[in-house]
Image (cartoon, helix red, strand yellow):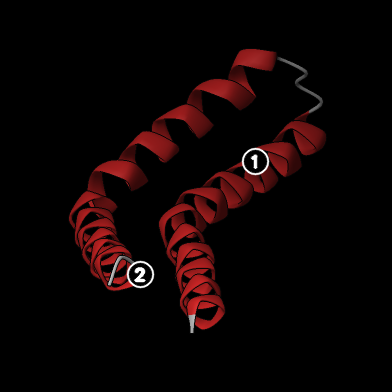
Amino acid sequence: MFYEQFIMIGRETLMSTLLLVGPVLAAALVAGLVIGVFQAATSINEATLAFVPKLLIVFAVLALSAPFMMSTMTTFFQSVFTEIAKVGR
């Protein structure tokens, strides 16, 4: 019985992690790709041109997805603490 609980907690941990970091990583990836294509097309090799827009986009995505992230983390921790309580019995 304990192994099934641990596997379920592990699976839920991985899924919650993917849900939390997925939008941020996808936005950074798309922004980097667009900026890279723009830099290649214009032959501008400025490091801040790549860094600052990606930073702003990541902050914007974090701000927009904060309610979703908080509800996901709240649900995850509630289920983890429920399972921990079951293990002690």
Numbered disc in front, either 2 or 1: 2
- Indicate the quadrant where residue 41 lies: top right
Instruction: Say which quadrant the C terminus sits in.
Output: bottom left
Q: Who's the residue at 81% across and 35% down the image?
A: 40
- Nearer to us in this view, 32 or 37: 32
Q: Which residue is mark 2?
A: 87
Q: Quadrant of residue 78?
A: bottom left
Give x and y (percent) for residue 52. 50, 22
Q: Nearer the viewer, residue 11 or 82?
A: 82
Identity of the amino acid at label 2? Val
Question: Which residue is the site of mark 1?
Answer: 32
| Sequence-first disc among 2 and 1 | 1
Residue 64: % across, % down: 24, 50
Q: Amino acid at mark 1?
A: Gly
Instruction: Identify the element where label 2 is drawn.
Output: helix
Residue at x-position 23% and y-position 69%: 82
Residue at x-position 35% and y-position 69% = 87
In the figure, 86 relative to 60: above or below?
below
Helix, strand or loop at mark 1: helix
37 or 52: which is nearer to us?
52
- In which quadrant of the rendered view does residue 68 lie? bottom left
Dot label at residue 52 = none
Residue extending furthest toward the front: 89
Residue drawn where x is 69% and y is 15% of the image: 47
Q: Decide: few, some or many residues near mark 1? Use Cα within 10 Å; few <14, some 14-19, many ≥20.
A: some
In the displayed structure, 61 sits above or below 15; it is above
Residue 10 is situated, as x and y percent measured from the top left of the image, at 53, 67
